[in-house]
Image: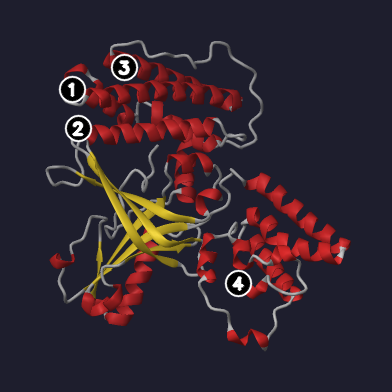
Amino acid sequence: MYCPDDIFYLSEIPASFSMGWAAFMCISPNVKEEGAMKEDTGTQDTPYTEDTLVEQLELCVDYLWKSERYELIADINKPVIAVFEKRRDFKRLSELYYDIHRSYLKVTEVVNSEKRLFGRYYRVAFYGQGFFEEEESKEFIYKEPKLTGLSEISQRLLKLYSDKFGADNVKMIQDSNKVNPKDLDSKFAYIQVTYVVPYFDEKEQQDKRTDFERHHNINRFVFETPFTLSGKKHGDVEEQCKRRTILTTSSSFPYLKKRIQVVEQQSTEMNPIEVAIDEMSRKVSELNQLCNMEEVDMIRLQLKLQGSVSVKVNAGPMAYARAFLEEKNAKKYPDNQVKLLKEIFRQFAEACGQALDVNERLIKEDQLEYQEEMRAHYRDMLTELSGIMNEQVSQSHEAKNRRARPQCTLKMFALESLSGWYELKRFQVQTTSEGLDTFGSLNTISL
């Protein structure tokens, strides 16, 4: 939305409106771009009035309702409220405050439910000077609607540029590795598409607590690429490394355009034990977050529990413990990293115990057998972990006394069915039969 300075600098509007485009800074930092624009010389022919301002902001509010960005409705309405306060139009003011009231009710309904789908993000890089000209070797972040998958955007871009350059002249780079343009055939146009997610540092992770905040005014994104020192992409946990790449864009999403250019890139490489520390820290964080939700998402909780303590699928966590914490193996790694990983596993055991307690309080009678099975797996995991770490890993969160179970508000289905449904709904697998791969713990489902 273009906001020239004279929008808020009208003789009949109170002095509080004189701040111009800066009045929208709380909505989006992108309005800074508007401040650098020269005033439109044609504004004298089409004067901008209070009524014009109100009409445009009301239209904006209507679009915010449609896009499910309820959190912004109150801020957008503030200039409109100021207009009607000056006019003492109490009927319109009551309507505005009722609209804001409804928006906050909607926020409380959906704030942490993950019912809103804010879109997905992809890094797209172009290579081929003879084809892409000024965009050659440049990277962009594309924002795609809802659950747009990697294969969908890849096929769309392939068709778009095949129609432009000829189908025989366009190739897709089918991994997320670094590309050296000198290694590419100049006869072809190359497109590389990689799934990315918003990136937040430690402070931002604490500040941005809701789904909306994690998808609003964001300009940093991250993806991870696996590699081994032997040159293979994948290996055993003792040799698996990964490269984390953080991309910064010139503006923030949401934006007027569906893509924004990448202006900065930072990469860090993790050795195998650092990969284990990173992966286990993420598992602990996810379990704690699920346990501390006001309305527990039983589907996600049980999927995470199954992936953490079930004997059938616990190769991930326990493989890390065996590879890096067993005495004969721990000597190969820095002492401080081994101690850190041990502490993370203590937290992991505690988080699993807490998750089992939460699950026990919420399940129905038909899941008692499942709960007991998970308890048994948990005890087996603690026994093995205690032997590996040469210490008694606490079962402090295992329930001593069975509590009354409040009725769960969600209808429970067989876990096998839920797993397939949940992956489809929330994390659509980012690997296609054509071989387009965006491997990385941030890019794949990690139970």
- The disc, 2 or 3, on the residue closer to the chain's N-terminal end is 2
Q: Name the residue under label 3.
A: 384
Task: Tell me if label 1 and label 3 are in contact, CB under 8 Å.
Answer: no
Query: Gap between marks 2 and 1, in whole Å?
Result: 10 Å
User: Percent from the top left, x then y, of residue 353?
Assistant: 47, 21
Query: Gap between marks 1 and 3, in whole Å?
Result: 16 Å
Number of marks in the rendered image: 4
Q: Mark 1 points at which residue?
A: 329
Q: What residue type is labelled 2?
A: Glu
Task: Tell me if label 2 and label 1 are in contact, CB under 8 Å.
Answer: yes
Q: Which amino acid does label 1 sit on?
A: Asn
* Badge 3 element: helix
- The disc, 2 or 4, on the residue closer to the chain's N-terminal end is 4
Query: Gap between marks 1 and 4, in whole Å?
Result: 62 Å
Would residue 125 be seen by someone viewing this image from the given angle?
yes
On residue 238, which mark appears?
A: 2
Q: At x 43% / y 39%, what residue is drawn?
A: 202
Q: Which residue lies furthest to the bottom in this view?
A: 45
Q: At x 61% / y 37%, what residue is drawn?
A: 411
Mark 3 neighbour density, 10 Å: few (under 14) some (14–19) many (20 or more) = some
Q: Mark 4 points at which residue?
A: 3
User: Percent from the top left, x then y, of residue 144?
Assistant: 46, 62
Residue toward you, 262 or 166: 262
> Is residue 351 shown above or below 146?
above
